[in-house]
Amino acid sequence: MINPLLADLRRIYEGNAWHGASVSEALHDVTTGQAAARPVPDAHSIYELTHHIAAWIGETTSRLQGNPPGNPADGDFPPRPTSIDDAAWADVRAHLERRQAELLETVSGFDAARLDDLVNPKSRNDSDGPVTFRALLSGLAQHSAYHAGQIVLLRKALSGK
């Protein structure tokens, strides 16, 4: 049963997702200037969204590895920088790729019989009750797809098209 979830996580990140642009497709050819830009006042930049996606992929991987739920070790969103240079943009993209690779490796080795086990039986209820590993992975897929859509919209706002 883990294979369909793994396939979804790959598609949402790498491409061929039915909903539209994957995370990688949304970020393809984004320049440093575009990543740093804030075409919508008070909205996160592409740079900040990229960091955020990576942070939550890392937190999900941590939970799958048996660590208690918490905020991402990388922070939810980075502090708003005054400027982002080429090195910072390259670093956040590389970090996202590493986090995705770690996730896929962890999910590949995850025991499918545990998908309906609770992530943390002592806490972290969502609106439907305690969170299972299946719900965690489904939620991560939804989270990544949502933010890929935001990135696409920011790119459209920047291009004026």
Image (cartoon, rainbow, N blue to C red):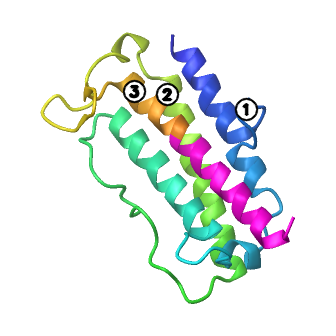
Pair 2/3: label in front:
3
* Quadrant in which residue 159 is drawn: bottom right
**Residue 84 visible from this viewpoint:** yes
Tag of residue 107 = 2
Pair 1/2: label in front:
1
Where residue 48 sits: x, y (%)?
55, 68
SS for tag 1?
loop
* Quadrant in which residue 75 is drawn: bottom left
**Residue 103 visible from this viewpoint:** no
Where residue 152 sits: x, y (%)?
73, 55
Q: Residue at x 36, y 58 (%)?
A: 73
Tag of residue 57 = none
Where residue 146 sits: x, y (%)?
58, 46
Number of numbered markers: 3
SS for tag 3?
helix
SS for tag 2?
helix
Q: Separation of disc 2 and disc 3 at Cα? A: 13 Å
Which residue is labeled 1 in the image? 17
User: Which badge, 1 or 2, is on the more N-terminal residue?
Assistant: 1
Residue 150 lies within the magenta run: yes
Q: Which residues are magenta?
A: 143-161
Q: Residue at x 53, y 53 (%)?
A: 53
Which residue is labeled 3 in the image? 135
Question: Residue flagged by tag 1: what amino acid is it?
Answer: Ala
Magenta stretch: helix, strand or loop mostly = helix
* Quadrant in which residue 110 is drawn: top left
